[in-house]
Image (cartoon, rainbow, N blue to C red):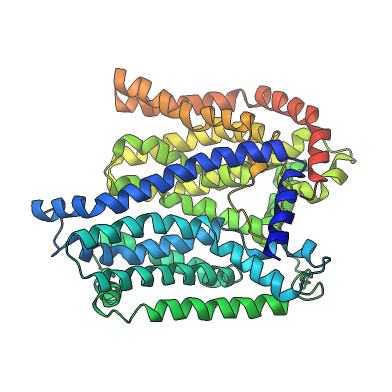
Amino acid sequence: MIKQFINLEWKSFFRSAAFKQNLAFKIFIGFFAILFLIEFAALGGFSYLILEEFIEEGKIVADNPFQIVNRFLIYWFVADLFFRYLIQKMPVANIKPLLYLPFTKSEIVKYSIGKTIVSFFNILPAFFFVPFSIVLLFNGYDAAGVISWHVAMLGITLSLNFLNIFLNNLDKVFYPVVVVVVVLGFAQYHEYFDITIYTAPVFEFFYENIWSFIIPIGLAIFLYQVAFKYFIKQLYLDVGLSKKVEEAKVEDLSFLDRFGKISTYLKNDIKLIKRNKRARTTFIIGFLFMFYGLYFVMLDQEGMMIFAALFCTGGFLFSFGGLVPSWDSSYYKLMMAQNIPYREFLLSKWWLMVMVTAASTILSLWYVYFGVEWLYAILAGAVYNIGLNSSVVLLGGAFVKTPIDLMSNKKAFGDSKAFNAKTLLLTIPKLILPVIIYYAFAWTISDAAGFIALALTGVLGLLFRNLIFKWIENIYKNEKYDTIAAYAQKD
């Protein structure tokens, strides 16, 4: 039976309307996946030696490297769950077509959940824990304790895999947890509060008690059974796959009337973000990018300020704007049958991105706490995003032909069709060009000159906006029928 399921998946891949595009994308992603696996294996193999040197030099206060790893495992698993939630595919994705074939419901559910077990998110941790466990054995740690600890880490990883299935339906619980974790991480970095003091003994318990691995393994088995029963109950066209009908609500968005003709499109996009899971998730992800700069602050990488500033202020611009006009894919054909000027449609998206970018900039001004240079970088990056990147993102949208399921947050970062040669080339003016502009002036004149040059480039983008929009409008018209045909594809 498993062979038949795999055969169906294989045919689905090769018979896809975008097979060549998907193949190129999978090869591209596969390369980076292998790179990640190699890096994690190296991290697992050499982290013990690196941490041992830090302890000897007094950079880290601990008795041994194993103790340090156990301290920070809580953040490992929280980050694991976070990225699973945003990226990992849920097993419900391929259930609909299977309902019409001669398979029992239990076979469909077992196969679907089994697909999540054989996931990159479950394989990646193994490339760290296996080499690290081997190193522990070579350094004289008790073999039974290491095996118990290792199996416990496997059990926790699988538990997160099954827990992620339910978190996809609990947005009101998940996002507050993310905020709490970010605050705790910030507090620990500045030594205000150390949550690891309370979590480290839990992970050490699995090493000190060789029977303790039964607990996380048992939890994983329990969550598997819960997931199995959950999907069995949802495996009906009139239950789990039916569309939810909610009470209609009237919203006052009259303040947008000042934008004239494009106000209709702005109101539609705001309602889209408020009412649809996928758009709402993308909106939240855009604002979470405001914390991206903390990564470089913690690593003391001030040379990456501009790169960080672009994401801190333009997270929504990249995540939402990168999928224009796919947000309107469900009714794009109807829109194109109306007398709707492309200029008005594009301007509405542009204004929405500009307004959110401006809001993100204001909310990111707290980076001045780390130095006035961060403030200059945030402001310069914001001007560049508003002046030039907003237009470049819309240009890239003309080549993104990915229909979006608005009722699901699956693939919240995009889809394989969103990556092609043209969209990849457009990352140059979006991310690479501003860094080049900054350093060209910063290294030859001064840092201030670099910030000014970057901001002036954004101002030039605003001055020539009409000319740029005329070019973008013509490209959208040329891609019109190809886009309509792509949105008609279901798989």
Say if 56 sits above or below 219 in the image: above
Residue 257 visible in the current orientation? no
Left or right: where 273 falls relative to 71: right
Left or right: where 237 falls relative to 309: right
Residue in the picture at 81% in, 72% down: 237
Q: Position of residue 339 (x, y in %)?
A: 89, 38
Q: How many marks?
A: 0
Of 161 and 255, nearer the camera is 161
Q: Position of residue 173 (x, y in %)?
A: 52, 72
Q: Position of residue 414 (x, y in %)?
A: 62, 47
Residue extending furthest top? 444
Residue 54 visible in the current orientation? yes
Q: Position of residue 67 (x, y in %)?
A: 21, 66
Of 446 and 250, nearer the camera is 446
Residue in the picture at 85% in, 44% down: 333
Of 23 and 187, nearer the camera is 23
Left or right: where 475 falls relative to 322: right
Which quadrant of the structure image shows residue 127?
A: bottom left
